[in-house]
Image: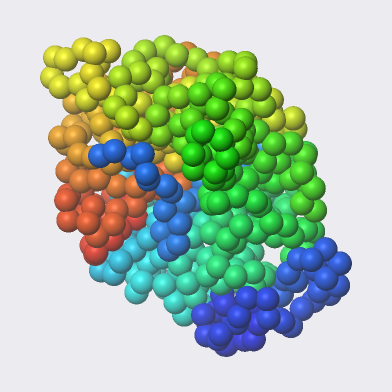
């Protein structure tokens, strides 16, 4: 086990043994001049129910959305072909009501654990980040920081812990770069770790960071508050810019177009749609120059078309097919998601197939989920779909049942464009009571069930849609696409744990051990 001594500046934040105020000077390695020229922060090198008002959790429990691209890189695109590891051998994808998983397990100890991010390394290793106070998963950890944060490396199926790296604060999000190194963010700022988690290669004290994205070119972008910092693979600052809006929820990075994407919402008090919340997707060059904007309407813009339902973006990610995926919700059916994102007079190319992707039967401002695909270079809308749950009892026709929320938290895609969505449901998802996980029946419905949804590339077929509730609810945090398999990271608050567990299969930890827990599943893809 390697233990690092306390340091000054940015590194102290990762080590967890100094004040290390954001923006304070570090020991630097030649990057400070670049940061000063671009307004960025120099990296410091180191040695080797009704969900109409819900928003993604930030802070210690993070909202990671890592998506493996070429070589297993999070939020990156397959630009050079797929030469990754062989698929995990845990059986095949099972269409229908019984959902096959490689594993489903709790992660954590007696303390209040927090889910952060998840991604696959180029060799298929699964990497999970979060807050795990006092818990080292039965292995001797590498201690970079003496705190609650941890990066846990597991076998591709999630069945074996390979290593644990301790950090000074909870990891709120992570992604793996094309070379296998690991980008992490938290109260310590942003850091790049060695592929085996043995050292912090560089850190940057940018304040409390919530989201991180890595491109196929190795570029790293980190979101802290409403600001984005962009670094090259070596930690040199490439850009620093603010994202206008009321709340910024997520970022993604596309190495092919050298673009950073941001989503959230902006409140507008103009027009008859008073206090209107407008979702947005914006594309920025690395230096912060705007490239394109989708949605981002003022209240007076939606008056004439009556698209007054508050809307907000939760997640953006670059799928393995190189496309930009967007997860969002609206509070009511009169939403801008019905329309082209730059022309409210034209309908969007949305696909509706049944009562669960057709938003009708809503009561008031019940939330309507939405996910869509865009061209990352131009922002062109290439297809989308609504998502609702329904309060259909035994034998009741869903088409006649009341609709409510099932908003997606994250959306991404496999290399063939198959869409992968995670989220939470406030009412019953389709066929809920007939579903099982590896033969284990779902428990009785409970509000805010975490789910996984897989949809065909053309949006016309729901391949799988299942919750994981044994008795309790949970929250969706992160999803990662590997070679022939997917990992989803959920969390349960102390209140959730008190209501009951999620289903576990071939688990490292079959039951909750503390006040709050992280929960991980790995499953094969179609």
Closer to us: 86 or 106: 106
**x and y percentages locating residue 24 in the rendered image:** 68, 81
Closer to us: 213 or 390: 390
Residue 152, picture quadrant: bottom left
Say left or right for 232 vs 63. Answer: right
Say left or right for 367 vs 316. Answer: left
Closer to us: 207 or 256: 207
**x and y percentages locating residue 193 in the rendered image:** 61, 65
Q: Residue at x 31, y 35 (%)?
A: 425
Is residue 417 something that shows in the picture?
no
Is 105 drawn above or below residue 26 in the view shown?
A: above
Is 406 drawn above or below residue 521 in the view shown?
A: above
Q: Residue at x 61, y 30 (%)?
A: 301
Color theme of the render: rainbow
**x and y percentages locating residue 523 in the rendered image:** 40, 36
Is residue 17 something that shows in the picture?
yes
**x and y percentages locating residue 109 in the rendered image:** 29, 66
Residue 281, picture quadrant: top right
Is 129 drawn above or below residue 381 in the view shown?
A: below
Q: Residue at x 73, y 69 (%)?
A: 41
Residue 82, picture quadrant: top right
Q: Residue at x 56, y 28 (%)?
A: 302
* Number of numbered labels in the structure image: 0
Say left or right for 333 vs 67. Answer: left
């Amino acid at each position: 086990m390697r233990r690092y001594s306390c340091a000054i500046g940015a590194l102290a934040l990762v080590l967890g043994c100094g004040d290390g105020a954001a923006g304070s000077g570090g020991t630097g390695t030649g990057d400070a001049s670049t940061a000063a020229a671009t307004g960025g922060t120099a990296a410091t090198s180191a040695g080797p129910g009704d969900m109409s008002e819900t928003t993604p959790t930030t802070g210690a429990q993070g909202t990671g959305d890592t998506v493996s691209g070429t070589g297993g890189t999070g939020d990156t695109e397959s630009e050079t072909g797929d030469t990754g590891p062989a698929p995990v051998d845990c059986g095949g994808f099972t269409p229908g009501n019984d959902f096959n998983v490689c594993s489903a397990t709790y992660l954590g100890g007696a303390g209040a654990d927090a889910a952060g991010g998840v991604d696959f390394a180029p060799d298929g290793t699964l990497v999970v980040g979060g807050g795990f106070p006092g818990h080292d998963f039965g292995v001797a950890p590498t201690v970079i920081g003496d705190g609650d944060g941890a990066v846990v490396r597991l076998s591709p199926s999630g069945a074996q812990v390979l290593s644990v790296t301790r950090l000074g604060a909870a990891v709120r999000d992570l992604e793996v770069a094309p070379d296998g190194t690991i980008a992490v963010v938290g109260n310590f700022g942003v850091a790049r770790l060695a592929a085996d988690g043995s050292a912090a290669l560089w850190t940057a004290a940018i304040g409390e960071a919530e989201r991180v994205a890595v491109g196929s070119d190795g570029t790293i972008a980190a979101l802290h508050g409403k600001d984005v910092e962009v670094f090259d693979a070596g930690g040199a600052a490439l850009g620093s810019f603010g994202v206008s809006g009321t709340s910024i929820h997520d970022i993604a990075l596309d190495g092919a177009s050298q673009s950073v994407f941001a989503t959230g919402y902006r409140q507008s008090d103009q027009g008859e749609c008073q206090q209107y919340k407008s979702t947005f997707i914006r594309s920025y060059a690395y230096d912060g120059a705007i490239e394109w904007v989708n949605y981002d309407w003022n209240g007076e813009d939606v008056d004439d078309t009556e698209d007054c339902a508050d809307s907000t973006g939760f997640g953006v990610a670059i799928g393995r097919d190189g496309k930009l995926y967007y997860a969002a919700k609206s509070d009511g059916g009169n939403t801008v998601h019905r329309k082209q994102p730059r022309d409210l007079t034209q309908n969007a190319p949305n696909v509706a197939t049944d009562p669960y992707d057709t938003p009708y039967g809503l009561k008031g401002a019940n939330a309507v989920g939405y996910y869509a695909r865009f061209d990352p270079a131009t922002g062109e809308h290439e297809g989308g779909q609504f998502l609702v749950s329904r309060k259909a009892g035994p034998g009741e026709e869903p088409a006649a049942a009341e609709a409510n929320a099932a908003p997606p938290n994250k959306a991404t895609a496999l290399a063939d464009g198959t869409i992968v969505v995670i989220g939470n449901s406030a009412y019953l998802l389709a066929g809920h009571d007939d579903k099982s996980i590896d033969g284990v029946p779902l428990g009785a419905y409970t509000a805010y069930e975490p789910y996984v949804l897989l949809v065909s590339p053309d949006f016309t077929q729901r391949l799988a849609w299942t919750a994981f509730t044994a008795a309790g609810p949970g929250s969706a945090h992160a999803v990662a696409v590997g070679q022939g398999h997917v990992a989803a990271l959920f969390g349960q608050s102390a209140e959730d744990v008190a209501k009951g567990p999620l289903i576990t299969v071939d688990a490292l930890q079959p039951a909750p051990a503390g006040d709050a827990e992280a929960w991980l599943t790995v499953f094969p893809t179609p």
